[in-house]
Image (spheres, helix red, strand yellow):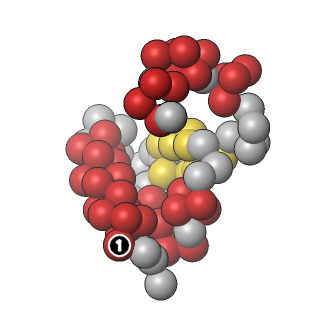
Amino acid sequence: MLSVNAAIMSKCIEKIIKLIAKMIPAGKRGCLIMDSVSFHRNEEILNSISALGFDVALLPPGSTSDLQPLDLSKMKPFKD
């Protein structure tokens, strides 16, 4: 069962994926690359994303500083 915050994020992700899915040619699958936050690893969310025609690649934990420098530098004040 998802927490309330995870359930809200799940719905947001699903809406975004549905919009993006419209841009993928018929018969093709997309690839969604996400960080490893706990609700991204939730089986319900991963199954929902897969059902919408996407494969999921999760970034390794602790890789933010190497792979997301903008997140580390510009978003850090909002996360502290």
Residue name at image x 57 percent, y 73 percent:
43
Give the quarter of the image for residue 64. Answer: top right
Q: Residues within 10 Å of mark 1 (few under 14, many from 20)?
A: few
Asked if residue 17 can be seen in this view, the reply is yes
For this rendering, which residue is in front, 47 or 53?
A: 47
Please provide percent x and percent y for residue 31.
Answer: 53, 42
Residue name at image x 30 percent, y 63 percent:
8
Residue name at image x 29 percent, y 46 percent:
16
Q: Is residue 73 above or below residue 46?
A: above
Please provide percent x and percent y for residue 14.
Answer: 32, 57
- 61 horizontally vs 33: left or right: right
Where is mark 1, residue-wise?
4
Asked if residue 14 can be seen in this view, the reply is no
Outermost residue to the bottom: 1
- 11 horizontally vs 42: left or right: left
Q: Is residue 29 above or below residue 2?
A: above
Q: Secondary structure at mark 1?
A: helix
For this rendering, which residue is in front, 73 or 15?
A: 73
Please provide percent x and percent y for residue 72.
Answer: 58, 22
Q: Is residue 29 above or below residue 65?
A: below
Residue name at image x 24 percent, y 44 percent:
19
- 68 horizontally vs 75: left or right: right
| Residue type, label 1 | Val
